[in-house]
Image: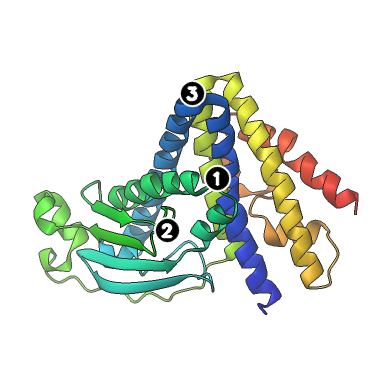
């Protein structure tokens, strides 16, 4: 049996995964192919945001912007005990790996949302990894667990020095920077709650942005439906965890297991990601559903 902290971290991960699929499902149900296009564009914008954030973090740490550092230094999240990977190659120019067990893929399968999971895989990973590498990276995702009959995800992510302009080579590879000494990095274990809250705020923000650009007020109505469904599901999952550990379903366990806070005004990051009435939409559609369920216990 997992510890309470481990279970909460897994719940945070699963609720982040399902937030994406509930928002995406609402857009696709309401707008069909155009809804899928909006979801894909929002996912790409989210990926680019994470890519540039990781790049700037590494630059600030004095690290080279390359594949080895992308996949080994300063990750956003603690490891998920369910995750399994077969790493075949990791060096400054490439990362080749097979993901054997992906909790996100498992959750999408359990909820019959492999199609939306595939959208995430197709759009997020290339946008994030390639943009991290100044848009000179290449991501080949040949197989994914979100496709039928696939046993693993096949990743080949590369950044070749010969593809870079001369002015960027020294930023990416030490052999082009004579005298460069790699800094010592004192790694700190990421905080699961903060990490998943950051990711959830960003992905929600970009999906709202693209829904409003494409569909106006009707897009907001679709987002509202997705939020209500995500809230009801998140409360249900929190109740399962509460029962497993002989705890009451209260606001503490909601905080521990759901990445989005019920008090978004108190989260500093929202100041950067509240350009389309994002907090207002969340407060009107997500928060009341959670509160009604908790208060009824």
Residue 21 location, quadrant: top right
Disc 1 and disc 2 in contact, CB within 8 angstroms: no
Residue 213 marker: 3
State which tag comes first along the sequence, 1 or 2: 1
**Residue 93 horizontal/vertical position (percent):** 19, 64
Q: Closer to the camera: disc 1 or disc 2? A: 2
- In the structure shown, which secondary structural element does the residue marked by tag 2 occupy? loop
Q: Secondary structure at mark 3?
A: helix
CB within 8 Å, label 3 to label 2: no
- Marks 1 & 3, CB-CB < 8 Å contact: no
Q: Give 127 or 261, whichever is nearer the viewer.
A: 127
Q: Nearer the viewer, mark 1 or mark 3?
A: 1
Judge whether 31 appears above or below 46 on screen: above
Label of residue 219 in the image: none
Q: Spatial distance from mark 3 to mark 2, Cα to Cα?
A: 31 Å
Q: Is residue 244 left or right of residue 183?
A: right
Residue 1 shown left or right of residue 118 in the figure: right
Name the residue at 75% across, 54% down.
236
- Which of these two is toward me, 238 or 115? 115
Give x and y (percent) for residue 7: 66, 70
x and y percentages locating residue 32 in the rendered image: 50, 27
Residue 130 percent across, percent down from the top left: 28, 50
**Residue lying farthest front?**
149
Q: Residue at x 59, y 50 (%)?
A: 18
Q: Residues within 10 Å of mark 3 (few under 14, many from 20)?
A: few
Q: Which residue is mark 1?
A: 20
In the image, 156: left or right of 242? left
Which of disc 2 and disc 3 is earlier in sequence? Answer: 2
**How many numbered discs, if any?**
3
Mark 1: secondary structure: helix
Figure colour scheme: rainbow
Residue 145 circle label: 2
């Amino acid at each position: 049996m997992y510890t309470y902290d481990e279970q909460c971290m897994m719940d945070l991960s699963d609720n982040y995964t399902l937030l994406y699929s509930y928002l995406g499902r609402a857009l696709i149900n309401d707008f069909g192919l155009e809804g899928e296009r909006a979801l894909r564009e929002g996912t790409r914008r989210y990926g680019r945001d994470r890519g540039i954030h990781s790049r700037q973090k590494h630059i600030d740490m004095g690290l080279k912007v390359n594949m080895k550092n992308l996949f080994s230094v300063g990750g956003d999240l603690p490891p998920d005990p369910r995750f399994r990977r077969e790493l075949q190659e990791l060096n400054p120019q490439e990362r080749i790996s097979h993901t054997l067990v992906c909790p996100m893929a498992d959750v999408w399968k359990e909820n019959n949302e492999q199609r939306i999971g595939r959208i995430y895989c197709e759009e997020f990973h290339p946008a994030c990894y390639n943009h991290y590498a100044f848009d000179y990276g290449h991501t080949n995702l040949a197989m994914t667990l979100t496709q039928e009959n696939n046993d693993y995800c096949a990743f080949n992510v590369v950044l070749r020095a010969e593809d870079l302009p001369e002015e960027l080579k020294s930023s990416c590879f030490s052999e082009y920077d004579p005298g460069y000494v790699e800094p010592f990095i004192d790694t700190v274990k990421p905080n699961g709650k903060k990490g998943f809250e950051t990711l959830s705020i960003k992905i929600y923000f970009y999906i709202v942005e693209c829904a409003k650009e494409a569909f106006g007020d009707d897009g907001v109505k679709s987002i509202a439906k997705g939020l209500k469904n995500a809230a009801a599901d998140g409360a249900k999952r929190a109740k399962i965890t509460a029962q497993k550990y002989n705890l009451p379903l209260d606001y503490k366990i909601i905080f521990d297991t759901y990445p989005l806070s019920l008090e978004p005004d108190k989260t500093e990051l929202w100041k950067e990601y509240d350009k389309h009435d994002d907090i207002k939409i969340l407060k009107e559609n997500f928060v009341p559903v959670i509160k009604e369920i908790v208060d009824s216990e």
